[in-house]
Image: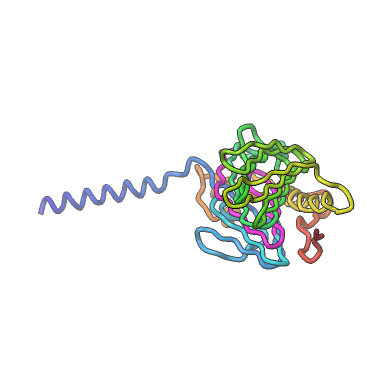
């Protein structure tokens, strides 16, 4: 009888310890994404399943996948201040997105609030990027089936197809590789690199060249995608607020030390411009 009571007391102590441990707040805030705009049929995949991407909704950043269908596009903003535009028929995974805590209030909204590590994989389609001024030590890695690129900011367009990948730098620079052990190409502002899959047993081919601004309309086409990402980025900034705030009901995640990363709408002097262009009005190539 005594041994049974001791066993019950031991189990009760273990349960109490487990509950106490579960209530300990996370040391880092959960990174977030804010949906600036969504046109047409766009889906998001999270640990909770697949659902329609909802405009102005907030999701966990890491481990999500966004897929646009034909005649649809979307724009999101990461809580590190990076705007991302997903063109028609595009699928992208945010495989990793971790962010250090930052001050509850900031003075320069153009600067990244804290050091972050972002890893994206583009299965197919076109993605436009517009970053804030990245903090020293932050990394933005973008991969496709043909290449990997460390983007150092601030404006880029990545096109991933079945047989090739093209990375265009409109502002800033990127370090690009066609294989893990391959040569690293420094792609500067105003240049683009195309990596084409080699034949079986052969290496991929790499071509670095200036971005054409001629009659083919390439420069304007690229800038349209970047401006969509940039407009989304300027719609919100992120703060750390008390977890008791009503605004955290939008979040799918846990607080860190009682604080949550919360998007705050920017109040522009002029009426806001929609961050994305309707899929029907997107210029083609």
Quarter occupied by the C terminus: bottom right
Position of 216 compared to 251: left or right? right
What kind of secondary structure does the magenta stretch mostly adopt? Answer: strand
Q: Is residue 153 above or below residue 268?
A: above
Give the quarter of the image for residue 171.
top right
Residue 161 drawn at (x, y percent): 67, 56
Please name whichever residue, 23 or 128, is drawn nearer the observer in this view of the structure.
Answer: 128
Q: Residue furthest left?
A: 1
Please name whichever residue, 76 or 69, is drawn nearer the observer in this view of the structure.
Answer: 69
State the scheme by which the image is colored: rainbow
Quarter occupied by the N terminus: bottom left
Give the quarter of the image for residue 116.
top right
Q: How many marks?
A: 0
Residue 268 drawn at (x, y percent): 79, 49
Residue 93 drawn at (x, y percent): 58, 54
Position of 203 compared to 194: left or right? left
**Residue found at x 26% / y 47%:** 13
Give the quarter of the image for residue 103.
top right
Please name whichever residue, 250 or 87, is drawn nearer the observer in this view of the structure.
Answer: 87
Residue 11 visible in the snapshot? yes
Residue 124 drawn at (x, y percent): 64, 57
Q: Is residue 91 magenta?
A: yes
Q: Is residue 169 above or below residue 215?
A: above
Position of 96 compared to 149: left or right? left
**Which residue range is magenta in the image?**
74-102
Residue 111 visible in the snapshot? no
**Residue found at x 64% / y 38%:** 113
**Residue found at x 64% / y 46%:** 204
Q: Is residue 21 magenta?
A: no
């Amino acid at each position: 009888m005594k041994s049974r009571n001791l066993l019950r007391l031991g189990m009760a102590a273990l349960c109490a310890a487990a509950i106490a441990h579960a209530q300990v707040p996370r040391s880092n805030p959960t990174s977030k994404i804010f949906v600036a705009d969504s046109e047409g049929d766009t889906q998001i995949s999270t640990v909770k399943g697949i659902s329609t991407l909802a405009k102005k909704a907030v999701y966990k950043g890491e481990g999500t996948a966004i897929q646009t269908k034909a005649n649809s596009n979307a724009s999101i903003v990461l809580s590190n201040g990076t705007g991302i535009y997903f063109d028609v028929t595009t699928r992208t995974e945010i495989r990793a997105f971790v962010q250090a805590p930052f001050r509850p209030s900031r003075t320069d909204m153009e600067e990244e609030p804290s050091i972050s590590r972002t890893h994206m994989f583009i299965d197919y389609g076109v993605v436009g990027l517009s970053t804030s001024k990245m903090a020293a030590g932050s990394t933005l890695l973008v991969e496709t089936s043909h290449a990997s690129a460390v983007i150092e900011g601030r404006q880029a367009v990545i096109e991933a197809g079945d047989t090739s990948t093209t990375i265009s730098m409109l502002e800033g620079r990127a370090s690009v590789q066609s294989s893990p052990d391959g040569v690293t190409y420094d792609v500067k502002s105003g240049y683009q690199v195309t990596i084409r899959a080699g034949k079986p047993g052969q290496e991929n081919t790499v071509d670095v060249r200036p971005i054409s601004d001629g009659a083919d309309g390439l420069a304007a086409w690229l800038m349209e995608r970047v401006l969509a990402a940039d407009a989304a980025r300027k719609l919100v900034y992120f703060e750390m607020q008390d977890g008791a705030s009503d605004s955290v009901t939008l979040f799918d995640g846990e607080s860190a030390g009682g604080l949550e990363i919360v998007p705050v709408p920017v109040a522009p002097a002029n009426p806001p411009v929609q961050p994305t262009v309707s899929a029907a009005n997107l210029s083609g190539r």
